[in-house]
């Protein structure tokens, strides 16, 4: 533990971070661009598949396509590319920031990977068991509809298992966690705030599902802090989404 704290102190000393307000403002900007890109991608899909439509027709198409697996996949990939690039620019704008240290782009030994990935697998299993005990559907309705309507289905797998974990972890456990941790919030406050923020963007789910996302976020944040690497949360997130997508495919 002493060695870990020493490494964290060295990292804080060698790279600059946006403070609390800088991290918060830039985080809001990134999320704003995220929302705009999703709308643009949605409109582009409607334009390519239905041509020019009226406002009334567009609203009806939105209701029809809001749970579409194809729309979800395209929007996820577009926002990952666009917002991921923006995130790198924001970090480089901070004088003294070292991208590799800011985001935690640090390789880890297999021993650390294996223990944390097993923990992620066990946590996913426990959350599934709790869901079943509470009499709730194992697959949320949104996910069931998205998977059933995905065409091609492989694009949805790419979006959920690769694209979404990549951007969300670079943003929440990379950028936001690093900035908030360096502020008055400290490590624990940063984990709680980023986990709550991550859960809050999943508006397609109900309160129970968002609470499980919060729990998963706390575990991902702990992994990021203990290992100093964002690669591990990306891998754990990808494993969780792989399990969820596999369950949707089977059930």
Image (spheres, helix red, strand yellow):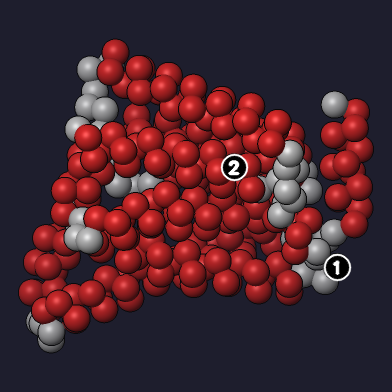
Q: Secondary structure at mark 2?
A: helix
Q: How many marks?
A: 2
Q: Which residue is mark 1?
A: 96
Above or below, 102 against 107 in this view is: below
- x 71%, y 54%: residue: 105
Question: Where in the figure is residue 134, as x and y percent of width and height?
Answer: 28, 16
Determine whether, in the image, residue 238 is placed left or right of residue 159. right
- x 61%, y 67%: residue: 87
Q: Which residue is mark 2?
A: 233
Above or below, 136 against 205 in this view is: above
Classify residue 54 by image quadrant: bottom left
Question: Where in the figure is residue 36, as x and y percent of width and height?
Answer: 39, 71
Above or below, 233 against 247 in this view is: below
- Crowd rating for badge 2 (residues with CA inside 10 Å; few <14, some 14–19, many 20+): many
Q: Secondary structure at mark 1?
A: loop
- Crowd rating for badge 1 (residues with CA inside 10 Å; few <14, some 14–19, many 20+): few
Classify residue 49 by image quadrant: bottom left
Q: Earlier in the sequence, mark 2 or mark 1?
A: 1
Instruction: Using the image as rendered, state which of residue 50 and residue 22 is in the foreground.
Output: 50
Determine whether, in the image, residue 190 is placed left or right of residue 122. right
- x 49%, y 22%: residue: 122
């Amino acid at each position: 533990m002493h060695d870990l704290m020493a490494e964290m102190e060295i990292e804080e000393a060698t790279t600059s971070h946006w403070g609390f307000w800088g991290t918060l403002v830039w985080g809001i900007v990134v999320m704003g661009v995220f929302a705009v890109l999703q709308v643009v991608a949605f409109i582009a899909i409607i334009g390519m598949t239905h041509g020019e439509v009226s406002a009334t027709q567009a609203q009806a198409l939105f209701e029809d396509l809001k749970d579409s697996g194809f729309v979800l996949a395209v929007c996820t990939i577009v926002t990952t590319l666009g917002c991921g690039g923006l995130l790198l620019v924001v970090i480089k704008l901070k004088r003294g920031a070292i991208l590799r240290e800011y985001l935690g782009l640090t390789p880890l030994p297999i021993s650390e990977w294996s223990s944390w990935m097993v923990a992620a697998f066990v946590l996913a299993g426990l959350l599934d068991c709790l869901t079943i005990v509470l009499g709730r559907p194992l697959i949320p309705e949104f996910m069931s509809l998205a998977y059933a309507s995905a065409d091609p289905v492989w694009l949805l797998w790419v979006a959920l298992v690769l694209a979404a974990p990549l951007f969300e972890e670079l943003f929440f456990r990379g950028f936001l966690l690093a900035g908030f941790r360096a502020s008055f919030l400290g490590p624990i406050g940063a984990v709680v705030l980023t986990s709550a923020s991550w859960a809050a963007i999943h508006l397609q789910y109900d309160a129970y599902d968002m609470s499980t996302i919060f729990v998963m976020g706390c575990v991902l944040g702990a992994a990021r802090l203990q290992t100093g690497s964002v690669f591990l949360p990306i891998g754990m997130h990808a494993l969780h989404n792989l399990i969820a997508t596999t369950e949707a495919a089977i059930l």
